[in-house]
Image (spheres, grey):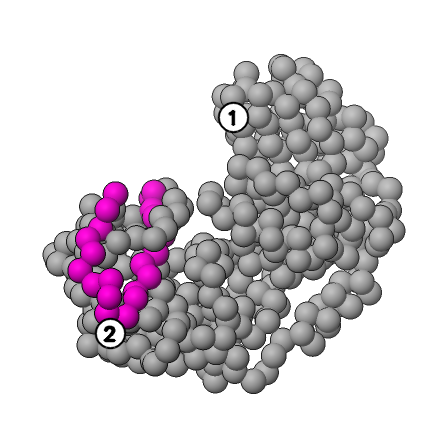
Amino acid sequence: MAKKTPTENFNIIVTTLSGLEEVLAEELQALDMEFVKVGNRAVSCSGNMRQLYEANLWCRTAIRILKPIRQFKALDEKSLYEQVQKTDWTGIMDLSMTFAIDAVVSHSTFEHSLYVSQLTKDAIVDQFRAKTGERPSVDRIRPDVRLNLHMHDNVVTLSLDSSGDSLHRRGYRLQTNVAPLNEVLAAGIIALSGWDKKSPFIDPMCGSGTFLIEAALMAQNMAPGLFRRDPFGFEKWKDYNEQLFELVWNTAEAKAKSAPQAQIIGYDLDEDYVEAARNNIENAGLESMIRVEQANFFETQAPEGHGVVVMNPPYNERIQSDDINLLYKQIGDTLKQSYQGYDAFVFTGNLEAAKNVGLRTSRRVPLYNGSIECRLLKYELYRGSRRGVTEEE
């Protein structure tokens, strides 16, 4: 692989969760990426090596940041094998390096992604054997080089994965609850709420504290990648620029604000969840930015003024609630009585139960929590005049 200068631009593909593409596009634009284009669970753009490093550190809604090597059409096994061999793999990795291939196949003559990744692996290994008489090893868990193969309508995009481990694994979580929220999803929901990072932010069913921590990271302008324990994928690349990455890292650290920027409050009824949240918050070094209390949401009162309340109540999918309809009715009643002047966001996978909230939604955003189809429901809690309005589909 020809060594690129830090200022030379190349294509970049950034993957995300369904429904967060526009949020991610805004993040990439904030990093001065060029030609930002929204796709399905991905955003493509153009940037240089510094921006690739920055995206891994700063993007809150990115899952993986890919650097495409080649794109080609492969109608059968022979053409796939031959096309993969057209890349000089010795320029990308050494014999001593391990590698793995993540393949995603859709609408193609090939039916199984596992078979496609096996064929790609054979082509790479055979090339090394022909040149050196030896072959590099595959390590599916912690490879030195992670490759991404995306095949749609028999068009293959072969990319280097610059992230390594998925970017949603921030590194601050010590403990989770039964159904922890993916950090990328939590960050995306907060971004979709339009929270200004200054007014109060409340999660009244905070579980292990993911919403609270992601909100605090935003308010304090802290890059989520700074908590990373494992190296990023690009740190093993042959053209890795250690000096440049050090500069990007130090700049990110310097941008963080040390004084609390917003009132961030979490409640949970369960003592164990409160303890888990506190431990995670402490691990992230955010204990002076976030307050967590053991409390029943239905007995809480919002701080004066305008703020945002975000919650992920049980759906009866992973966490069972005794009477899900009553729970959602109580959520609506509490929001109406104790959170006037706030914007409330309820993230749920149980749309039937959500009808019991008894408030009109001003916005409904389709999202997924794993395989569960969900909605982010927005309720504008006006003071007095708009009470008693019922939910409309």
Indicate which disc residue 106 carries.
1
| Nearer-N-terminus badge (2/1) | 1
Left or right: residue 9 compared with residue 367: right
Q: Amino acid at mark 1?
A: Ser
Left or right: residue 50 compared with residue 382: right
In which quadrant of the rendered view does residue 345 lie? bottom left
Magenta-highlighted residues? 372-393
In which quadrant of the rendered view does residue 115 lie? top right
Residue 17 picture location, percent across and down: 48, 46
Taking the spot 48% from the left edge, 78% from the top edge, the residue there is 262
Task: Report the number of numbered marks.
Answer: 2
Residue 242 picture location, percent across and down: 79, 62
Give 263 or 271, whichever is nearer the viewer. 263
Give 307 or 80, whichever is nearer the viewer. 307
Q: Is residue 175 visible?
A: no
Residue bearing mark 2:
338
**Is residue 379 part of the magenta span, yes or no?**
yes
Crowd rating for badge 2 (residues with CA inside 10 Å; few <14, some 14–19, many 20+): some
Query: Disc 2 on helix, strand or loop?
Result: helix
Measure the C-alpha gap from mark 2 to mark 1: 49 Å
Taking the spot 60% from the left edge, 63% from the top edge, the residue there is 225
Residue 338 picture location, percent across and down: 24, 74
Q: Amino acid at mark 2?
A: Ser
Task: Tell me the quarter of the image containing the C terminus.
Answer: top left
Crowd rating for badge 1 (residues with CA inside 10 Å; few <14, some 14–19, many 20+): some
